[in-house]
Image (tube, rainbow, N blue to C red):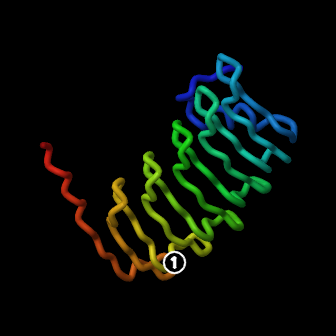
Amino acid sequence: MSLPHFTPLWLPLLLLAGCAPDTRSLEFEDGTPFLETSWRDQHLHGPFRQWYPGGNPERELHYRDGERTGEWVWWYENGQVKRRGSFDDGWRHGSWSTWHENGQLQFQGEYQAGDKLGLWRGWYEDGSPSYEETWDTGTRLAVKRFPKPASPAAD
């Protein structure tokens, strides 16, 4: 079965949900992988992988008995990491980072049981700071925003 890249994510999941407990995959028309999922007792269990047309990975997620777990990674189509973080017992937990497509860090912070915690920082595409926020178990205590630097004047 081949699917175009823009197929909603839920459609292949719906098609695969009734499958026997094992790994199932779908391909693009050219035969390259589109989606690979693992199932146990009609629940996602194990790695969930999706690719862009052309073969670069789009996302790699992990489930245990239908619950989000472990490290989750998303990529831009050019292969640059877009976002990375972890889940524990279904909740975002630990360090989470997102990058601009040019590879510059966009924001970074910590989660504890699904709540933002501590210092969160953000950066513009040029690497200059965009914000700093302080969080305590999901409550924002302080925020500081930085103006975007002026672009150099054209000569």
* Residue furthest to the top: 30
Q: Residue at x 71, y 31 (%)?
A: 15
The quarter of the displayed image where residue 1 is located: top right
The vertical placement of 28 against 59, above or below, is above
| Of the pair 12 and 147, the residue shown nearer to us | 147
The vertical placement of 99 against 115, above or below, is above
Q: Residue at x 44, y 46 (%)?
A: 101
Q: Position of residue 110 (x, y in %)?
A: 54, 72
| Of the pair 107 and 149, the residue shown nearer to us | 149
The quarter of the displayed image where residue 52 is located: top right
Characterize the local packing of mark 1: few (<14), some (14-19) or many (20 or more) Cα atoms within 10 angstroms.
many
Q: Position of residue 92 (x, y in %)?
A: 60, 65
Query: Helix, strand, or loop for circle 1?
Result: strand
Q: Residue at x 70, y 29 (%)?
A: 33
Task: Please state, as top left, top right, bottom left or bottom right, where the C terminus lies in the image.
Answer: top left
User: Residue type at mark 1?
Assistant: Leu
* Residue furthest to the front: 155
Residue underneath mark 1: 117
Q: Residue at x 64, y 30 (%)?
A: 55
Q: Position of residue 72 (x, y in %)?
A: 64, 54
User: How many numbered discs sit on the rendered protein?
Assistant: 1
Apparent side of residue 52 relative to residue 121 in the rendered image (left or right): right
Apparent side of residue 155 relative to residue 148 in the rendered image (left or right): left
Apparent side of residue 39 relative to residue 79 in the rendered image (left or right): right
Q: Position of residue 121 (x, y in %)?
A: 42, 70
